[in-house]
Image (spheres, rainbow, N blue to C red):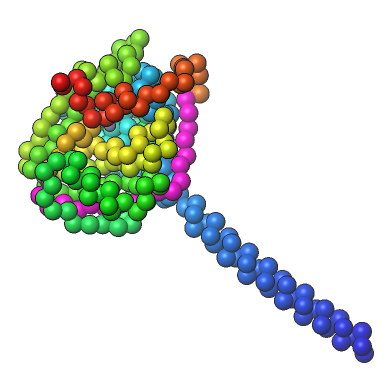
C-alpha cells in the first residue's frame, strides 16, 4: 500500500516535470519561429565592394531574385541601369532614361530584396530636399542597427534620378563608371521611392545608411535617387532583422582584393556629386 502511494506521488511529480518541459519548450519554439519568418530576411547577392571594384558580371537571375523578395534595389549585368523591385516586379531604369520590365533570365551582379510588410506608416508633408526628408526618417526608423525597407508613395514636385550605362570589359571601377551617369529631373511626378536603410556595420557589404531608388507610377521613368522634394506622401517602413547573402562562385570575385576601404569612394558614387562638379 505504501509503495503504491509512493508510485502515485512519483507519477504526479513526473507528469508535472513533463508539463513544465512542454510549456517552456512551446514558448521557446514560438520565440524562435517568430524571429525567423521569411518576411524578416533581407536577401543580398554579392557585396557593394565587389561592385566598387568593377565586378559587374551578373550571377543571379530575376526569376531567382524574386523568390527572395518582392521589394528592393540593385543593378544589372554589366551595370546596365538601376534596378527597382516593387510589388514583385523588376524594373530596369537605363541611362537613356527608359524603364522596362526585366526579363526573368536577366541577371544581376548586386541586389538586395525582401518581402515588404508594412510595420508602420506615416504621412509626410513638405520637404524641400532629400537630406531634410531623411533627417525626419532618421527619427522614425525603428532602430539604426536593423535593416529597414523604405517605401514612399506620393506625387513629388521634383525628383532627381540617375542611371549608369552598361560597361564593357575590362570593367572600370564604379567610381569611374558613374562618371558616365545620366541625370534626369522629373517634375510633378507620381511614383514610389524604393529603398533600404542599412546599419553602419554593413560597410563593405552593402551601403550604410539610406540607399534609395525611384520609379514613376506609369513605370516609364526612374533610377537611383539623388534628390527629391515632397508635398504630401506616405512613408511605409518594414524593419528587417535577418540577412542572407549569396556570393559569386565563379569569375573575378574569387581572386579580387577586398582588403582596401572603399567607403570614401562609395560616398561619392551614391550621392553622384563628384562627376557633376
Ligand atoms: Zn542605387
In the rendered view, does 15 fall on the left or right side of 5? left
User: Which span is picked out in magenta?
Assistant: 230-248
Give above or below for 28 relative to 56. Answer: below
Q: Is residue 58 visible?
A: no
Give above or below for 108 relative to 89. Answer: above
Q: Residue furthest bottom?
A: 1
Name the residue located 62 percent from the left edge and 70 percent from the top edge: 23
Name the residue located 13 percent from the left edge and 53 percent from the top edge: 125
In reply to whether residue 63 is colored magenta, the answer given is no
Residue 227: x and y, percent?
16, 36
Q: Is residue 247 visible?
A: yes
Query: Can you say which quadrant of the picture contains the N terminus?
Result: bottom right
Name the residue located 11 percent from the left edge and 50 percent from the top edge: 126
Q: Quadrant of residue 167?
A: top left
In reply to whether residue 243 is colored magenta, the answer given is yes
Query: Can you say which quadrant of the picture contains the C terminus?
Result: top left
Q: Quadrant of residue 201?
A: top left
Residue 30: x and y, percent?
54, 62
Amino acid at each position: 500500500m505504501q509503495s503504491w502511494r509512493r508510485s502515485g506521488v512519483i507519477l504526479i511529480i513526473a507528469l508535472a516535470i513533463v508539463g513544465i518541459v512542454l510549456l517552456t519548450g512551446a514558448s521557446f519554439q514560438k520565440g524562435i519561429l517568430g524571429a525567423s519568418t521569411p518576411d524578416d530576411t533581407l536577401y543580398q547577392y554579392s557585396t557593394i565592394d565587389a561592385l566598387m571594384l568593377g565586378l559587374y558580371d551578373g550571377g543571379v537571375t530575376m526569376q531567382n531574385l524574386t523568390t527572395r523578395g518582392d521589394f528592393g534595389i540593385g543593378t544589372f549585368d554589366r551595370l546596365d541601369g538601376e534596378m527597382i523591385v516593387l510589388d514583385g516586379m523588376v524594373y530596369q531604369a537605363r541611362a537613356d532614361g527608359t524603364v522596362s520590365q526585366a526579363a526573368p533570365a536577366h541577371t544581376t551582379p548586386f541586389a538586395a530584396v525582401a518581402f515588404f510588410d508594412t510595420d508602420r506608416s506615416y504621412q509626410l508633408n513638405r520637404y524641400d530636399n532629400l537630406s531634410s526628408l531623411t533627417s525626419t526618417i532618421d527619427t522614425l526608423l525603428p532602430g539604426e542597427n536593423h535593416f529597414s525597407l523604405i517605401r514612399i508613395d506620393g506625387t513629388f514636385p521634383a525628383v532627381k534620378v540617375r542611371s549608369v550605362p552598361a560597361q564593357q570589359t575590362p570593367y572600370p571601377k564604379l567610381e569611374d563608371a558613374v562618371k558616365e551617369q545620366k541625370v534626369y529631373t522629373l517634375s510633378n511626378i507620381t511614383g514610389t521611392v524604393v529603398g533600404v536603410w542599412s546599419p553602419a556595420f554593413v560597410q563593405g557589404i552593402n551601403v550604410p545608411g539610406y540607399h534609395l531608388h525611384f520609379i514613376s507610377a506609369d513605370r516609364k521613368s526612374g533610377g537611383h535617387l539623388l534628390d527629391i522634394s515632397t508635398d504630401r506622401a506616405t512613408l511605409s517602413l518594414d524593419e528587417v532583422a535577418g540577412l542572407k547573402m549569396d556570393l559569386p562562385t565563379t569569375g573575378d570575385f574569387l581572386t579580387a582584393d577586398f582588403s582596401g576601404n572603399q567607403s570614401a569612394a562609395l560616398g561619392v558614387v551614391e550621392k553622384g556629386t563628384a562627376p557633376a562638379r
